[in-house]
Image: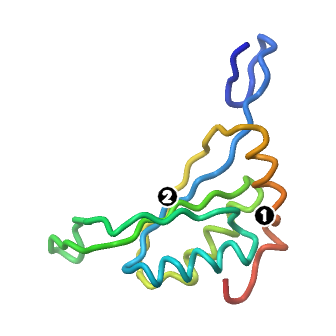
């Protein structure tokens, strides 16, 4: 029996999913601090950090290169907006990378993510 995201009319079960938000920070200390805050606020179940990575981008008419730390935040569908808001309001960049996608996951992992994240209203804090 196969799984399909959202299920279908053939009777195959719906595959459950989590949301994964990607962002970058200028250094490890900032990435660690923001990761801990997101998890403590209950808007992310887990944040994985990777780095440093080399980023090349266009900014204000110039080609820039910088070392950054990538963070992948795992959250529930109901906590997605609160997690994005927490990243935006505490991010040191004026235009941070914030991308997200829905990712199929094992039922047990989805259940854990849902259990440790709060809904949008409960997850909002003044200083995530």
Colour scheme of the rendered structure: rainbow
Q: Which residue sits at x=77%, y=57%? A: 78
The residue nearer to you, when weighing 57 against 71, is 71
Q: Residue at x 72, y 88 (%)?
A: 126
Q: Quadrant of the C terminus?
A: bottom right
Under circle 1, the secondary element is: loop
In the rendered image, the vertical position of residue 127 relative to residue 22, given as above or below: below
Say which of 112 and 3 sits in front: 112
Position of 125 with respect to 100 (left or right) is: right
Judged by depth in the image, the label closer to the viewer, 1 or 2, is 1
The spot of residue 74 in percent (x, y) is 63, 57
Q: Is residue 125 left or right of residue 22?
A: right
Name which of mark 1 and mark 2 comes first in the sequence: 2
> Where in the figure is residue 86, as x and y percent of width and height?
63, 76
Please tell me how crowded label 2 is: few (under 14), some (14-19), or many (20+) other residues with Cα within 10 Å: few
Q: Is residue 4 above or below residue 64?
A: above
Q: Who's the residue at 74% across and 62% down the image? A: 79
Q: Which residue is mark 1?
A: 117
Q: CA distance from mark 1 to mark 2?
A: 19 Å
Would you identify the image quadrant in which residue 40 lies? bottom right
How many dots with numbers?
2
Image spot of residue 28 (x, y percent): 42, 79
Q: Residue furthest bottom?
A: 127
What residue is disc 2 on?
99
Q: Quadrant of the N terminus?
A: top right
63 w.r.t. 76: above or below: below
Q: Is residue 46 left or right of residue 29?
A: right
Q: Which mark is residue 82?
A: none
Within 10 Å of the Cα at label 1, are there few (<14), some (14-19), or many (20+) other Cα atoms? many
Q: Position of residue 18 (x, y in %)?
A: 68, 48
Residue occupying image coordinates x 56% and y 48%: 101
Q: Quadrant of residue 82?
A: bottom right
């Amino acid at each position: 029996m196969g799984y399909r995201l959202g299920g279908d009319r053939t009777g195959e079960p719906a595959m459950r999913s989590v949301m994964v938000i990607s962002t970058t920070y200028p250094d490890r200390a900032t990435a660690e601090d923001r990761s801990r805050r997101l998890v403590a606020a209950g808007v992310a179940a887990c944040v994985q950090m990777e780095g440093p990575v080399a980023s090349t981008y266009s900014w204000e008419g110039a080609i820039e290169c910088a070392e950054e730390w990538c963070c992948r935040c795992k959250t529930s569908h109901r906590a997605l907006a609160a997690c994005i808001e927490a990243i935006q309001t505490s991010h040191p960049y004026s235009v941070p990378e914030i991308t997200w996608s829905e990712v199929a996951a094992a039922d047990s992992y989805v259940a854990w993510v849902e259990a440790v994240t709060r809904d949008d209203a409960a997850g909002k804090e003044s200083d995530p």
